[in-house]
Amino acid sequence: MSQMATRKGHLTYMSIKAHIAQLEAAGKLVRYVPHSRHPVKRCLFLTNDASDDLTNPKSAINLLHLRPQILAAMTHWTTGGLVYASRGKGRFLRRLKAPPPEVWEMRVTDPRVQSRAFVRFAEPDALIMTRIHTRDLLGKKSSREWAKAMKACCATWDELFPNISPFVGSTVHDYITENCNDFPL
Amino acid sequence: MISLSEKFLTPDELGEYGYQRIKFMAFDAVQKLWHRREAEGLKQKDLAQRIGRDPAWVSKNLRGPANWTLRTLGEFVQGLDGELELSVHAMEDPISPRPNYHAYAEYELPPFTQPAVTLLQLETEQQEPEKQYRLGRVISTAGTSSNLLLAGRECENATS
């Protein structure tokens, strides 16, 4: 995926990797690097809003003491942990029903006050996390709050990646290349 | 490069984080053996019978690690005719073989030689020429001061 750029009449192509690198340098994205002996196997970049959800003492996530569970899920992702799914409700990652398209949730189901991190795939195995919501705030799946949260995810993406669509795959294995249960999108 | 990690957690949170990590790892390990046994023909109800559990309990705990305890791990390992190997390493202990790749390697900015100016930045430069120098600074934080000045001049020249 590339973004065409012009400079002094010359055409230059920037890959999404380079674009992400620039966003990091500009302080608009921050990467998650778990404290582990093992190399990072998948990427996770947080927007400023998502970082704030984790680090701001007044955020709902902090007030409800949900950080450890969310960070454990983030570490699970980046260290290449199993992206599990079953026929029932148990899924680590789920692509939400469009519209809008290509908004996924990282499901943190422990403790009882659960949380959902909204993410989009920049590339296979590379997620951009836009916000983290408490499950209670989102309400029922068809609620206005869900729709608002999904729309906000897309708006954040469009601001960071103008004219660049998120990655689109046909099967879950296009998005997550290793250690992933086979499940329908 | 600024990054986020679990190191900013408070002591209370760090303990909970450790517990959650172990649950994920235990679940992963059991899932691998479960899928192998399932491919060999084992059903969830057979597994439940082996360990004296209700099939619903087996089904729930094979869906995700949220409710897992050490007991859950032990029961599944026995039920799946497996053997657990546990070892705890110091963070400073090397891994063997030593990996030479990490996923973020391709997201590093190249050495600051030719600044890459995006279309968005050029459009903004054309609209706000007085901000050209500042945009030059935003392009990269990796360059030296002379490179940043160079970026500023090149931004000015872009619209001249």
Image (cartoon, rainbow, N blue to C red):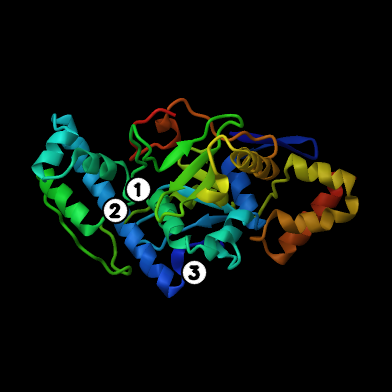
Percent position of residue A147, x then y: 62, 37
Kindly indicate whether the residue at mark 3 contacts the one at mark 2 (C-beta within 8 angstroms): no
Residue at image mark 2: B25
Chain-order first, disc 2 or disc 3: 3
Q: Is residue A173 left or right of residue A29?
A: left
Q: Residue at x 37, y 61 (%)?
A: A36
Kind of residue indicated by mark 1? Gly
Q: Is residue B82 left or right of residue A164?
A: left
Marker disc for residue A81 = 1
Q: Residue at x 80, y 51 (%)?
A: B154
Q: Residue at x 40, y 69 (%)?
A: B14
Closest to the observer, B6 or A125: B6
Percent position of residue A11, x then y: 72, 34
Residue at image mark 3: B8
Q: Is residue B150 left or right of residue B126?
A: left
The vertical placement of B95 against A140, above or below, is: below
Percent position of residue A87, x then y: 34, 32
Q: Residue at x 58, y 54 (%)?
A: A50
Kind of residue indicated by mark 3? Phe
Q: Is residue A41 left or right of residue B79?
A: right
